[in-house]
Image: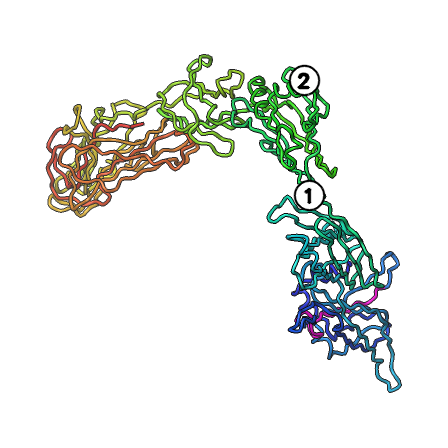
Amino acid sequence: MFIMKKLRFLPVLLAIVMTSCMKNQFDDFRDGADEIGLLQVAVDVDDKVQIVPVKGDDGSLGMDESLVPPADSLYVELYRYSKRKADSKKETWNRIYFGRYDEAKDSVFKVVAGDWKLLAFHGDSTACGFDKPYFLAEEEFTVDGGLDESGNPVRNMVSAVAKVSNVRITVDYDRTVPGSFYDFFVRFTNLDQVKKKQILRYKKDQEKDAYMMASDSVQIEFMGQTELNDESSWKFVVLDTIATKPNDHLTLAISAEPRYGTLKVNITTDDNIIEKNIDAVIQEAWAPQDPPQIVAAGFVEGDHAIIEGDENGNGATISAVARAGLKNFFFRIDSDYKSLLPGVPLGQEIDLADPSLDASVKEALADAGFEWQDNMKGSRRLTYLTMTDFFTMVNDNIASLTRDENVASFSIRVVDDVDHETTLDLTATAYAIYQTLLLDEGDVWANRIVSPKLQVSAGVSSLFTLQVSENGYSWNDWVSYKSADNGVLDFGTLEVRPNTLYYFRTIYNGNPNLVSNLVAVTTEEELQIGNPGFEEYHTTVMHVSPLGWLYDYDREWYLPYNEGDTDPWWAVNSKKTMPDGHTAWTSNFCKNFPCTAYSTDRYEGDRSAMVYTVNVGSGNTDGTAVGTSVPGEIWIGKADNDGNHSADGRAFASRPTSVKFWYKYAPINNETFAVTISMKDKDGNEIARSEKLDGAASSEWAQCEIPVLYSNTKAKAASIYISFRSTTSGSVNTAVSMEIAGKQQTAHIGSVLRIDNVELTY
């Protein structure tokens, strides 16, 4: 049997590799001084056995040639006997060759003299079914070495014949069997096979032979249906249990007396032609093939969950099917909750099918909420026991548990009329409600809290309520869950007040003993940026020293914060267009001029911020702009002495949803203004960024709103950055005269953006 298993699972790829590598090259397996001989192999298939009977036109049975494999299709294996090593107790066979016989038959193998084994096979050694014969030949032989009389290496021949090596089965029903049963079959079961247990059904009208693995214990059963289309009318009888060997041919000849009578069975094996004549009585009330079946609805893996408030979960019914007829329905209860079961005999089997059952016991069971079918014996094959009212009563009386607790254990034992029985043990457990409220700090915004979640162990989702308190001890119901997924309830988005301390917990079924952990959070403030209306501005003076010292002058420029402010919100890039040295001969506005200022043209208040593109350079003249064009920019942060960014953003502990502002925009050459918004966390990671690069022209004050787009909604904000630029390019017109800082000033100026009343929304 070991070899058969090994053959079955041999990979084809391995077979190909070994064939190509080992054929006719056995010199590598010499043991030093061992002699060498020549070996030829001859195998054939036993064609005398009748594989499958096939009816001919004249009614005779012939052989199905298609199931007899040609010799060339056999697989051949050669094994060499391995001597036991000094440190080993095993004597093994080493496989030296594997290949098809059509490749091996014309080969002469040069091999080491000694003990050898030949295997030849075809098919599946573990097959079970029809048209599945397994052929096997096994031959041990000795290879002689040395030289013959002619001085040539001795030539050895080995031959073997492959025969059917699993068990062949034939069943012959005579005409009395279909006359006695509407449907029938014989079932063969290998009882001693654990990992490869085989069951074969040989049905009526079957004319082919079947095959299965040999077994020391093959159980043979006859199944017959006595009523048309009535599944409950199946009867069965065990005919015999016999041992089979490879190459056995097991035949059964079955006839029947009139219906419900006697089977005449003749069992024959071709191993020394053993015959057994059996008279098997098929009784009308004989046991069906299955023992009684018990199904417990309302139990999961034998346990009924008692959960406070779960009215739908109280349903529980025990159904029993006894096809041979119900004889006993034994019911036993064990419980420490004796007050729930007054008068019920605990720890004792009670036969609910007994018509003489004590009336007081019946009444006590009924009062406890158990209901069963009257006259169970009369119902014969199907009955039930309902526990729904019992569990409803338990649910109403056992609540507020702080731990899981066994309430009761049940044992149901059903016996049928032929004394087959089935037992089912069940439990009922009252489960505590464990709930853990989860609320990430990052989900707490200024005016909303996103998705508080509750992990629950059990319970009815609709009975969990989120409660809120502003002092930690006076609680109000807020909302029920919005969605549930795999034991996690999501309470959706909550509307809250900014800069407020809230306490949250959940409660189950209004029961103050079943509450979650407490979570305290403070909502963010609805913070605004500093100097949002740009009312705070001061003028400062830069002394400019051209190459010609006679042309020294002071240039006024404008900073968006009060003079002396050590922590201003806004910075400007005017120093980029205000060099401190240049050629002197021409008007200084084209050599040095700020690119940001305030304006008296405002939406509200007295001032607005003003950013505009400026062109300055030593080569400029009053009518030419050949220097560098720099878009004006104002941003939250700091600038260095050259007008570059030295810091972007400043501390900010809120997360706005958008930025609004009022603006006027006078572009040239279809230019657009640009706005950038960025939020970062405490580690400097950007959590939100929005850019508007297509700011359109507007000759009147108009409002613009830019959403703040968060890439990380879980991180708290630690800084905010906003930048306004007059354009994304940089064209100018020459000698433009316009209002700047409340007076007409002239410069080479391009697109002009005025901004007022920047507001953060939440």
Q: Which mark is residue 206?
A: none
Q: Is residue 79 magenta?
A: yes
Element assignment for label 1 = loop
Front-lying residue, 200 or 57: 57
Q: Is residue 738 left or right of residue 156?
A: left
Question: Residue at 57% across / 20% down in the picture?
Answer: 393
Residue tagged 2? 360
Residue tagged 1? 290
Element assignment for label 2 = helix
Residue 148 can be seen in this image = yes
Span colored in magenta: 66-82
Q: Earlier in the sequence, mark 1 or mark 2?
A: 1
Label 2 neighbour load within 10 Å: few <14, some 14-19, many 20+: few
The quadrant of the picture occupied by the N terminus is bottom right
Question: Residue at 36% across / 22% down in the picture?
Answer: 496
Front-lying residue, 108 or 673: 108
Q: Measuring from the top left, give residue 405's x and y in whole percent.
A: 63, 22
Q: Measuring from the top left, give residue 259's x and y in whole percent.
A: 70, 50
Disc 1 and disc 2: Cα gap in Å? Answer: 35 Å
- Disc 1 versus disc 2: nearer the observer: 2
Question: Three-letter amino acid code at disc 2?
Answer: Ser
Question: Three-letter amino acid code at disc 1?
Answer: Asp
